């Protein structure tokens, strides 16, 4: 009961912020963290000592957050400068709680990077050479990170509070009802009768589901529970079935209209309107799934993969009924953004209310009070858990961004990239992609994107990329680690669910998801593909050019057995994509 009450309070608080108007940032952001901490420290699994330490840290963290809320007016007048030992203790406690919260939520790597950033900020003046800094008074350094609207309470945390949390709640409400089954039924009706139909159903359903979940791992675990058994029953090799699910689920994070949390962080960092980001991301996302589709056709020819049996395909009446459970909220969302011209978060709140109303109904048309209560409980609990994990990630990443800003380290790393690349765009893109891959192995996509774009984005923009172009490039490459060894989360989960060697799955996934490696570069070589809203005809022509090349590369890698055939098809595809582009 305590969990349900806290979950309800978290949901009501975030929805209330949108409807209530302006709330001071040093009130809304600390309360956001205070509501998230119990789900990280108390309601997580663990032994007695873990729970005891968690309860202590949670109490301390909540106390600091409430102290900041109670004293926000006075703290604002301090301009990020700590006064007295008590405030130093508060600042230290808050940073410790944030680091440990991130560790418990997602593991060691991100908090270790944040701790190293803190150490650099406090002791970096002793580092000789250009990578040292001039030093910042400790009261100012810690105060900027903890009691001012920078660091922990910076703009990224504001995105988590005001936008990401709302769309996470929206996704949780949809998933608690019949929307997930609606995705599956629509996908099965659209692609189930095609050759390799089960794999194509997985692609479509994962694209739909992944857009609202924003997590490749959650996508694999949810849609994979249905699609993986369906593929194995039809004789798909296990490595292929798991690879299809991993690749399709990873692509969900780049598929508009929602694109998980990344799109809203991008809005804050680029100051580009959300609708413009969504329009720019649409054609590349379609190209990604097109390449996956071509790859599935090649595999279907190689393994003679069958379509889904007619008897296993949903009836049109069932498709129509279940699809309403996601079409209605999505229609309300799109109407709010594009017709009524509401902000994305306000439109999402209205869509949440529409989705909430649908939780009182099911596809059978029956009214079962127990089922309704279970759906409402699921929506609240899943909302709270997902919002809290994202809050832990973003607040911890905000420490790193704050240190970069205070010390000027970001500018120095940008200069290093520029000098290391010799001032040429192509080497800079390669170095950035490598950094994204390495960092993405250990931290979630959104955190990897935020950190990489903070240090590498300015270098790419100095070499001629438009801000949105640079941000989308980094965001796409932050996804590489979901299917690329040695750490490939989506592959690990899919391989475990189906009982296959993960490395075999990863190799198939890399071939099937070849677009993830090529399309970011294609966006740089063919910038018109990102201008669908402003120049639709050039954007469509650029997409057609990239699509033709991608199709050749995808089929060449998978469809041909002889190395020379593969090399010829892939080489021709790459030439089509990049000849005349900015990379050659």
Image: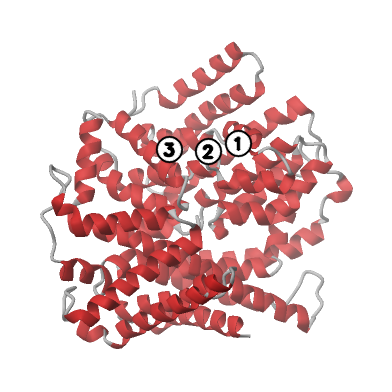
Q: Within 10 angstroms of label 1, few (less than 14), some, or many (20 or more) residues?
A: many
Tell me if residue 407 comes above or below residue 75 in the rendering.
above
Q: Nearer the viewer, mark 3 or mark 1?
A: 1
Q: Secondary structure at mark 3?
A: helix
Residue in view at x 52 percent, y 78 percent = 11
Q: Within 10 angstroms of label 3, few (less than 14), some, or many (20 or more) residues?
A: many
| Residue most extreme to the front | 49
For label 3, the residue is: 520
Residue 185 point in image, percent of width and height:
74, 55
| Residue most extreme to the top | 564
Residue in view at x 83 percent, y 43 percent = 233
Residue 4 point in image, percent of width and height:
60, 82
For label 2, the residue is: 486
Q: Earlier in the sequence, mark 1 or mark 2?
A: 2
| Residue most extreme to the left | 134
Left or right: 348, with 422 as reference point = right
Query: Which image quadrant for residue 31?
Result: bottom left
Q: Within 10 angstroms of label 2, few (less than 14), some, or many (20 or more) residues?
A: few
Residue in view at x 36 percent, y 84 percent = 66
Which is more toward the observer, 228 or 260? 228
For label 1, the residue is: 506
Q: Secondary structure at mark 2?
A: loop
Tell me if residue 440 comes above or below residue 88 in the rendering.
above
Residue in view at x 75 percent, y 65 percent = 321
Q: Are marks 1 and 2 in contact (CB under 8 Å)?
A: no
Q: Nearer the viewer, mark 2 or mark 3?
A: 2
Q: Are marks 2 and 3 in contact (CB under 8 Å)?
A: no
Q: Nearer the viewer, mark 1 or mark 2?
A: 2
Work out which quarter of the rendered image holds the C terminus and state it.
top left
Task: Give me the C-alpha separation between circle 1 and circle 2.
Answer: 9 Å
């Amino acid at each position: 009961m305590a969990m349900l009450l806290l979950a309800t309070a978290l949901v009501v608080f975030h929805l209330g912020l949108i409807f209530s108007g302006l709330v001071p940032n040093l009130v809304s952001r600390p309360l956001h963290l205070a509501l998230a901490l119990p789900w990280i420290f108390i309601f997580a699994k663990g032994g007695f000592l873990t729970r005891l330490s968690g309860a202590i840290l949670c109490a301390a963290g909540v106390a600091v957050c409430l102290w900041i809320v109670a004293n926000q007016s006075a703290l604002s007048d301090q301009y990020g400068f700590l006064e007295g030992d008590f405030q130093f203790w508060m600042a230290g406690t808050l940073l410790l709680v944030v680091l440990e919260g991130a560790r418990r939520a997602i593991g060691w790597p991100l908090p270790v990077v944040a701790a190293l950033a803190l150490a650099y900020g406090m002791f970096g003046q002793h580092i000789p050479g250009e990578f040292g800094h001039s030093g910042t008074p400790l009261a100012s350094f810690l105060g900027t990170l903890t009691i001012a609207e920078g660091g922990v309470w910076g703009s990224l945390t504001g995105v988590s509070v005001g936008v990401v949390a709302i769309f996470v709640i929206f996704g949780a409400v949809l998933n608690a009802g019949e929307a997930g089954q609606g995705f599956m039924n629509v996908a099965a009706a659209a692609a189930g009768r095609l050759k390799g139909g089960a794999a194509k159903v997985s692609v479509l359903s994962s694209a739909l589901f992944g857009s609202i979940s924003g997590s490749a791992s959650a996508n694999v675990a949810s849609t994979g529970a249905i699609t993986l058994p369906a593929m194995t029953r039809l004789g798909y090799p296990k490595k292929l079935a798991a690879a299809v699910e991993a690749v399709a689920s990873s692509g969900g994070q780049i598929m508009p209209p929602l694109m998980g949390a990344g799109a809203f962080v991008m809005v804050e960092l680029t100051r580009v309107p959300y609708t413009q980001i969504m329009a720019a991301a649409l054609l590349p996302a379609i190209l990604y799934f097109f390449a996956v589709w071509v790859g599935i056709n090649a595999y279907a020819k190689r393994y003679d993969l069958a379509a889904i049996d007619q008897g296993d395909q949903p009836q049109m009446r069932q498709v129509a009924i279940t699809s309403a459970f996601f079409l209605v909220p999505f229609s309300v969302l799109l109407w709010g953004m594009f017709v009524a011209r509401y902000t994305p978060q306000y439109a999402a709140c209205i869509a949440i209310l529409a989705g909430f109303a649908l939780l009182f109904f099911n596809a059978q048309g029956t009214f079962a009070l127990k089922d309704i209560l279970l759906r409402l409980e699921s929506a609240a609990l899943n909302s709270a858990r997902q919002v809290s994990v994202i809050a832990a990630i973003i607040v911890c990443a905000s420490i790193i961004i704050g240190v970069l800003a205070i010390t000027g380290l970001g500018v120095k790393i940008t200069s290093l990239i520029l000098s290391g690349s010799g001032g040429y765009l192509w080497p800079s893109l390669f170095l950035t992609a490598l950094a994204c891959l390495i960092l993405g192995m250990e931290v979630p996509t959104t955190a990897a994107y935020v950190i990489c774009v903070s240090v590498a984005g300015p270098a790419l923009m100095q070499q001629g990329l438009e801000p949105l172009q640079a941000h989308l490039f980094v965001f796409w490459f932050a996804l590489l680690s979901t299917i690329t060894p040695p750490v490939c989360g989506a592959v690990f989960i899919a391989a475990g669910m189906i009982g296959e060697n993960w490395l075999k799955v990863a190799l198939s996934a890399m071939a099937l998801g070849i677009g993830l490696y090529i399309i970011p570069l294609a966006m740089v070589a063919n910038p018109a593909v990102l201008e669908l809203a402003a120049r639709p005809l050039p954007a469509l022509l650029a997409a057609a050019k990239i699509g033709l090349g991608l199709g050749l590369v995808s089929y060449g890698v998978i469809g041909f057995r002889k190395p020379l055939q593969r090399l010829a098809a892939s080489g021709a595809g790459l030439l089509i994509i990049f000849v005349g582009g900015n990379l050659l």
